[in-house]
Image (cartoon, rainbow, N blue to C red):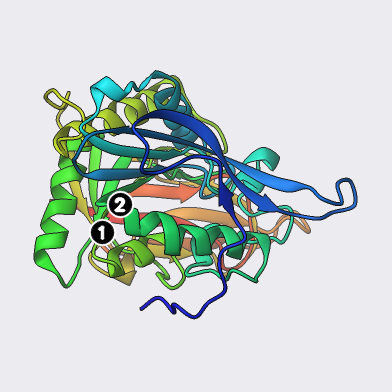
Amino acid sequence: MIDKGLRPSPISPTVDFSAEGVQHGFLRLPYSRDDSAWGSVMVPITVVKNGEGPTALLTGGNHGDEYEGPIALFDLARTLKAADVSGRVIVVPAMNYPAFAAGTRTSPIDRGNMNRSFPGKPDGTVTEKIADYFQRELLPLADIVLDFHSGGKTLDFLPFCAAHILPDKRQEARAFELVDAFSAPYSMKMLEIDAVGMYDTAAEEMGKVFITTELGGGGTATAKSAGIAKRGVINVLRQAGIVAGKADTVPTQWLDMPDGNCFSFAEEGGLIEPLVDMGETVVAGQVVARIYPIGRSGALTSEVSAKMDGVLCARHFPGLVKPGDCVAVLARAV
């Protein structure tokens, strides 16, 4: 439950969420710093409203080094017309804008990970203040929420859209309906390593229909991954009845992450040699990566093995790993 006794958010929107038409503006957060005593963090936002209907909250840049979402949403913000909409679309292409502008996963201001900062604090760090505004002001406006992710600089994923298994089966079914409509090459019943403080959890606990993506990685986007994002967001808006027309669907392979055995972690650091490529099938006990110590040649290697049968759907991206890094993620084909 949201504490109504909390102080008001310091963020001021330059858009009117109830106004008809198309508005491009900012969420302005005062931020006094060395180079600007009365400065602000300016988070771009677009609101497109036309009559009555559901509200979609579309977000990217939750982590600042993930680019498919910002590409799709900056493009949507410049092209979506009020006449195309029945209801309201709120577009925030880069919700952790300081991280996005710096090209980093977390904010360069406070090292805040937006997706571990909910419900936020109106008197907290910059990242917590942004999270608080989403928690108390934007999420309550939404009926459906689409939050774009990819692997950033340290992970690579098969391109999938995902939702979570939920206690409320009607809410869960509606989410998976939108996942199917998004029509990524893969669709995932997703398990989180740690759901505490996540935007996903905040939205789902409010009863919102929440879907997300992982659309590649390596700290960049490709023509293919950006195209999946751009087609997917329109498909979701069409399926929700906010934009007219039929979803432009392609075949999707459903995957399931049943439990923690999906994840394999490095116990030693060093140079990683992948032994399985993305999308390949593995069996429990199979070695999926080898790690070479880099302090001297001739040293014994360590191995990372699969804990279950499945398809390799994510892997560590850079060539060097540290103890505790996630090396591989498996899922089962449904």
In the rendered image, which quarter is residue 242 located in?
Answer: top left
Q: Residue at x 40, y 69 (%)?
A: 195
50 vs 182, nearest the viewer: 50
Q: Is residue 44 left or right of residue 294?
A: left
- Image position, residue 53 (x, y; %): 18, 41
Residue assigned mark 1:
208
Q: Looking at the image, is mark 1 or mark 2 earlier in the sequence? A: 2
Secondary structure type for disc 1:
loop
Q: Is residue 334 left or right of residue 37?
A: left
* Above/below status of 306 relative to 248: below
Residue assigned mark 2:
142
Q: Amino acid at mark 2?
A: Ala
* Quadrant position of the N terminus in the picture: bottom left
Q: Furthest-right residue in view?
A: 34
Q: Amino acid at mark 1?
A: Lys
Q: Residue at x 44, y 77 (%)?
A: 4
- Image position, residue 199 (x, y; %): 42, 60
Secondary structure type for disc 2:
loop
| Callouts 1 and 2 close, C-beta under 8 Å | yes
Q: Residue at x 56, y 57 (%)?
A: 130
* Label 1 Cα crowd, 10 Å radius (few <14 / some 14-19 / many 20+): many
In the rendered image, which quarter is residue 220 located in?
Answer: top right
- Image position, residue 284 (x, y; %): 28, 63
Q: Residue at x 52, y 64 (%)?
A: 132
In the rendered image, which quarter is residue 300 located in?
Answer: bottom right
Q: Furthest-front residue in view?
A: 19
Q: Is residue 279 left or right of residue 32?
A: left
- Image position, residue 27 (x, y; %): 57, 46
* Above/below status of 164 relative to 242: below
Cα gap from disc 1 to disc 2, whole angstroms: 7 Å
For residue 108, the mark is: none
